[in-house]
Image: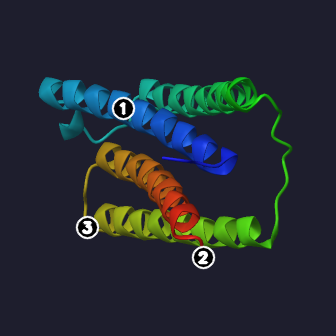
Amino acid sequence: MNTTYQENRTIAYLISMILVTAYYLCFLWEEFQKGVFETDTIPSEWGWTVLKLVGAQIVLSVVASIGVSIMYAILNRETEKEVSDERDKLFELKTNQLSFTIFGLGFLSSMLCLALGTAPLLVLNLIVLSMFAGSMVGYIAKLYFYRRGY
């Protein structure tokens, strides 16, 4: 499969997002089995956990981008110049809109859950998971647009 630099970079970002999300889901499962979700308070450790995961996602994205650039240079014997044309900007706009829509719907549903009396810890996790889902759907859509070519 012949892929462009933008596709390779998007695949690397998607893989890093999947890794961070998988780690977070494993963490959630362990906490769920401990019965943590039945409390009405949110311990500060949850806030730190989310901040660490966001930081890890940023670091993984930077490492993935550098790795893709290095691999592209090695395989193609040239460096990819960060050139963005109208098509790239249109794809970015469409995927951002889709990502923000997914996140917005997740945020609204979590606020509805909070209004209906759901535990705040569950609401926090719904917000975080909707953020991860929005990003993943955006990356998948970007790959689709690049493969489709429109």
Q: Is residue 19 above or below residue 114?
A: above
Horizontal and vertical percent for residue 148? Answer: 51, 70
Residue on which disc 2 sits = 150
Q: Looking at numbered disc 2 in the image, what kind of residue is underneath it? A: Tyr
Left or right: 55 in relation to 87: left
Q: Residues within 10 Å of mark 1 (few under 14, many from 20)?
A: some
Position of the C terminus by quadrant? bottom right
**Quarter holding residue 28:** top left
Of discs 2 and 3, which sits in the foreground?
2
Q: Residues within 10 Å of mark 3 (few under 14, many from 20)?
A: few
Q: Is residue 140 above or below residue 12?
A: below
Front position in the image: 61 or 71:
71
Q: Is residue 105 above or below residue 131?
A: below
Q: Looking at numbered disc 3 in the image, what kind of residue is underneath it? A: Leu
Left or right: 10 in relation to 134: right
Name which of mark 2 and mark 3 comes first in the sequence. 3
Left or right: 20 in relation to 61: left
Of discs 2 and 1, which sits in the foreground?
2
Q: Residues within 10 Å of mark 2 (few under 14, many from 20)?
A: few
Horizontal and vertical percent for residue 43? Answer: 40, 29
Front position in the image: 5 or 123:
5
Residue on which disc 3 sits = 116
**Quarter holding residue 24:** top left
